[in-house]
Image: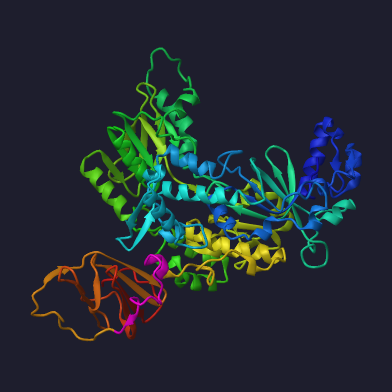
Amino acid sequence: VAVTSEGTAGAVVFAAVRAYPCLRSLPFAAGTMADPAACSSAGVHVDPNATASACPHADLVIVGASEAAVHLMERLPESVFCLKKAERSEGPTRDDRVVVVTGDAGVSSGDWMASARAKSTRLRLWDAVGRATLPSQCPSTDPTALKRWVERKQRLGEAEVGALKVVPWFDGFVESASLGTVDHFLSSRIKQNSKRKMKVIKDKLASISTYIPEAAEKGEQRGDDNANEGNGPALQLRLTLSSGSTLTASHVVLADDGFVLGHANMPPWVGRIDLASKVCRLGRDDAGRADGEKQPASQIWESLHFAESDLDLTKEDVSGKVICIVGGGMTSAHLAEEAIKSGAKHVYLVCRSPLKVKEFEAANSWMGTKSMRPFLKLRSARERIKVYKKERGQGTITTKTKQILDGLVESSRLEVLQETQISTAALQFSDGMWQIELDNNEKDAILADAIWVATGRSTDIASEPVLQNISQTLSLPSMGGFPVLNDETLAWAKAPVYFMGSSASISLGPVAKSPIGYRTAAEKIARAVLSAMELGTESMEVGPTASSCFVDDEAMLCDGEGPNEEDHEDKPVRHEKRDPFEGAEVIRQTIEHYEWSDCEFDIDLYIRVGEQLNRENVFVDIGTQSLQVWAKSTPSNKVHHLHIPRLYKPIQLEKSYFKVIERKGKIVVHLAKTDSHEWRFLKA
């Protein structure tokens, strides 16, 4: 046994040995405790040979065989996986340069993406469309690879094509793939990467600690503050797995897709269920049951399930039942639809906050550099967290999901209770129904046969068991539950521990836990690891997006059409107020559906007419606080017209322009704001 940190851990070992003398026979490593004399007085046998150098070593350990990990693997060159001849001669402890630990918070061991796949199967999510653009969903360096793969599969008529689903999304501006489609593509990339020389360990990470190899061999103390400052040997990491085995690493990447770190959010009323149920039972004269007898906990939990852990729609029988679903996001809305499809009599959807309708969880400008530039200029981690929390919840459900919910509400089978919280939930033993007390002005209580909780997951680095050892030993910075990382490398201060997923939100903003965030993190971490391993970033697997940490905004929104395409040319605006098609025999149609985004000094308006356009037949009139658009489509001779008589605020005419994408019938109007104040609405 080797405890590789001093101070608190040493005191714990000392107390444990005093309490349990049988532990004295274990060969603790030299340097376990700050005071070697304390070891001797406690009767602890110190084995100078039980050092970290005896553990298998890898240059890079990726924790979490997740979607985020696939993004990283795609960007690592072959030189990372191959041992040099000199390294092979170091002995059996140096047999792999790259190790992947597959276990996560959901399973202690398993294959790639085990927890994510189990959740999608339990909740029937495979046909759900991801809230991301098709290029950003692709883990390959070429953002068009996913679309070309789907087209090739469909063209060849392969059997699995039935599961492949790519649909128009975001009012037709882009396409998005279903979760099942993305999973099929990820499987193909995992299979390809498995041919590389790497070791896969089906286990779960228990903790990360530090040690200095040379100091460990001399029996000196671990974790010297100067170890990574050029004044001593390089800091190394020791990983302890749930099975008890250990390995050491030069670099560790926590590829978190929501399952590696964190835990399911637990509403406060859940902790009061047992007491509330007992009070509920005591309030009635139940013949045949002694007063004060408590309902077994197993019976209470039979009708209370959590989307993040045990809810399994493939096994639930909801026919004729009343279901209460807690949560206000896409998962809870999906569960409501599935429950009604499965024959539920009535469904209550209890949402703590109002439902916000947007196609993506954050504004479109976060997909590129437009919103990231001002975000990264904020030097305070506290200010970045404020921006993250504000922008992350911009869209809780999509337009299509809102339409589905509205249809279910009209059928009287669904009741959506917004801005409502559950105060108490108690199981009535007479009929097995849940009595749910609400903090709501319109409804005080409801009865339900079952409660499904879909309140998501959250991560708090300060209380994360896996990271507590290294965090305390090196005094690593954190803020608001997130680690404060290096913006360029996503490394945690002086420790060679890198983060992907929501844990990197202070450096990547509200898109950290999304495919575009995985792409960005993979680019940064791959460059950092290659530089540290002195392999050179020129060998890095890069694609069309490597010139920037982020995929260009318009490449995301316009399905890969970059600003240099022939039909994507800037066009000056007109400053006239008359109809250019006045008197012409055309069919007129009002433009009612469009999307817009606000980023600091810019407003971008996205219009899709659904028919091919000719650049010469598109006219945009912009006033100091007004906007009109006329677009005559080529095939149908229709004139599409948008008129906004008064914009939210005045704009700069000389810096405003528009673009036409003829082939796809799209118009992008760029409005230059006069200040950086946020526009809450497009129209005044």
**Magenta stretch, overall SS:** loop
Of residues 427 and 551, the one nearer the viewer is: 551
Task: From the viewer's perspective, tell me whether residue 34 is left or right of residue 377.
Answer: right
- Tell how many labels: 0
Tell me where residue 677 sits by quadrant.
Answer: bottom left
Q: Nearer the viewer, residue 155 or 249?
A: 155
Task: Answer with the quarter of the image where residue 435 lies.
Answer: top left
- Is 264 on the left or on the right of 404, as rendered? right
Give percent across and percent down for residue 152: 41, 54
Q: Which residues are magenta?
A: 554-572
Image coordinates of residue 331 in percent, x first then y, are 40, 45
Q: Quadrant of residue 653?
A: bottom left
Is any part of residue 292 visible from this angle?
A: yes
Residue 260 vertical placement versus 282 (above, below): below
Give the side of residue 84 with respect to residue 339, left or right: right
Magenta-drawn stretch contains 555: yes
